[in-house]
Amino acid sequence: MLTEFYTIFIGYCKEIIPALIIGFFLSGLINEFIPDKWVEENLSNKGIKGILYATFIGALMPVCCWGSLPIAISFYMRGASLGPVLAILIATPATSINALIVTAKFMGIPFAVYLFFSVLLIGVIAGLIGNKLHVKPKEKNDEKEPECKSCCEAGKKSKNIASKTMFYRFRSILKFAYIDMPKRIGKETVLGLFLATGIQVITPIGYLIKNFLSGNLGYLFSLIFGLSVYMCATMGVPLVDAFIKQGLAIGPGFVLLLVGPITSYGTILVLKKEFGTKILLVYLGLICVLATLLGVLLGFLQ
């Protein structure tokens, strides 16, 4: 069993490491050349424009789910409506440059494209519904915001890009790409690889999936598992790939790949605190329903 575990683990590493190297570098470029001021001015725009900006930028932003929380709440404190806040809380953790590249590597380019546009669709729908919900306006905060901690720190930056030399920019790109990003998602990615390998090796898990979760019950499993266990978008790809290889249908696998990253404990607690239980339940309900419908559609198209 140990030999099999080692062989499968090394195989996963050979697949994912080149993709992560490219993805980390692209994340560094985004971090360096898209200033926070531009993002804040556009994402704070109310209405459909603000939702579209929040969803699209959030889907590409190299920030983990915990990093998206202070960003989204800061928009709310500046007067952003609930719609853009929900959109960015969905789009940011659900996918990223890294996750898309790794997804294309494991699941294929069509799957990655479908995932990306599904995230955009869910973000826009949640944003539009969020703007219709009544939420007590938050007073704008003109005070200096507290320094962001841990994994969020790299997601918030204030810098004058025009004044930087090319050497400084290149150094900044490499630092963010190969120091900050591995610190942020490195542990989760390694954990995901170990879990994925374990699922491949441990027979009872494979037996359970093949005999009980290969049909429609797979959707229920994906929802429960995704709501109860947090995984970042990149980490979830090899894990879902392992489930699919053990017999889980592509539709439920897709649902798990969406629900897992979006519904972290941090997001749930912050939403409840800032907006109340009603908004939280609407948020979770929308994610579960829309992810399941899109998963069923993907299964039908396969």
Image (cartoon, rainbow, N blue to C red):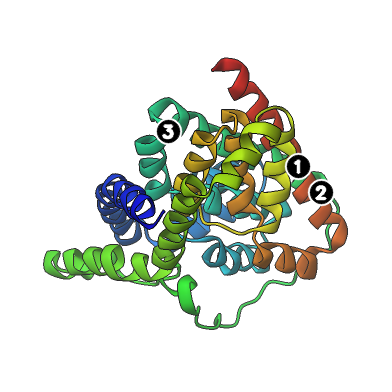
Reading the image, the residue beneath label 3 is: 107
Count of numbered labels shown in the rendering: 3
In the rendered image, the residue lying farthest to the left is 167
Marker disc for residue 282: 2
Residue depicted at 83% across the width and 58% down the height: 135
- Which amino acid type is marked by label 3? Met
Q: Secondary structure at mark 3?
A: helix
Checking the image for residue 137, the label placed there is: none
Q: CA distance from mark 1 to mark 2?
A: 6 Å
Q: Few, some or many C-alpha atoms within 10 Å of disc 3 (few <14, some 14-19, many ≥20)?
A: some
222 in relation to 168, above or below: above
Q: Secondary structure beneath disc 2?
A: helix
**Decide: marks 2, 3 in contact (CB < 8 A)?**
no
Label 1 and label 3: CA atoms lie apart by 25 Å
Dot 1 or dot 3: first in sequence order is 3
Which residue has dot 1 on it? 286
Residues at marks 1 and 2 touching, judged by CB atoms closer than 8 Å: yes
**Looking at the image, residue 190 lies above or below residue 286:** below
Q: Is residue 45 visible?
A: no
Q: Decide which of 191, 26 is in the foreground and name it.
A: 191
At 26% from the left edge and 55% from the top edge, which residue is drawn? 25
Tell me: residue 66, above or below residue 19: below
Q: Residue furthest top?
A: 301
